[in-house]
Image (spheres, grey):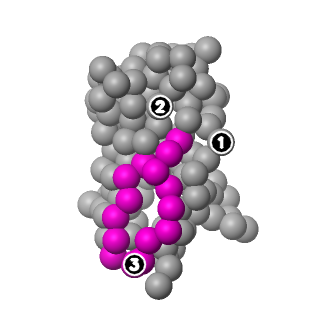
Amino acid sequence: QVHPIESGGGSVQPGGSLSLSCTDSGGSLSKYTVAWFRQATGKERQYVAGISWQGHSTYGDDSVEGRFTISRDNAKDTVYLQMNSLKPEDTAVYYCAVVTIPGGSYDVWGQGTQVTVSS
């Protein structure tokens, strides 16, 4: 059973950078498609970026593409989200989610990590 754990959140000024990590205590994350979602207070959860086990990536919308980069290191069972040029509107709880059944939806979720962008 996969158990994604997020880390790397925190507070940063506008224009700054943060790198989030998603690991798995069970050591099996490398087999799955993994994505980052975010949810700001009072807003719906938003797909940020996803990456297949082979390393093919997709991004949710233009607001993050070019600023955020998703990557993975299967040897370390870790998926990363590098976030640059952060804006106040990027403030949210960021979640790591996993597709454990091929062709299915994201069915296993981490607890989330808070990212706050403020001056």
Q: Which residue is mark 3?
A: 14
Quadrant location of residue 25?
Answer: top right
Position of residue 68 relative to residue 107, above or below, is below
Quadrant location of residue 3?
Answer: top right
Q: Which residue is mark 1?
A: 111
Specify whether residue 43 is painted magenta: no
Which x, y percent locates residue 77?
A: 39, 24
Which residue is at a point 48% across and 73% down the rendered structure image? 117
Q: CA distance from mark 3 to mark 2?
A: 27 Å
Which residue is at a point 53% across and 42% down the rendered structure image? 6
Q: Earlier in the sequence, mark 3 or mark 2?
A: 3
Residue bounds of the magenta highlight: 6-20
Which residue is at a point 30% across and 29% down the rendered structure image? 73
Which amino acid lies under the numbered mark 3 shown in the image of this protein? Pro
Position of residue 12 relative to residue 22, above or below, is below
Position of residue 11 relative to residue 27, above or below, is below
Q: Would residue 57 be found to the left or right of residue 49 on screen?
A: left
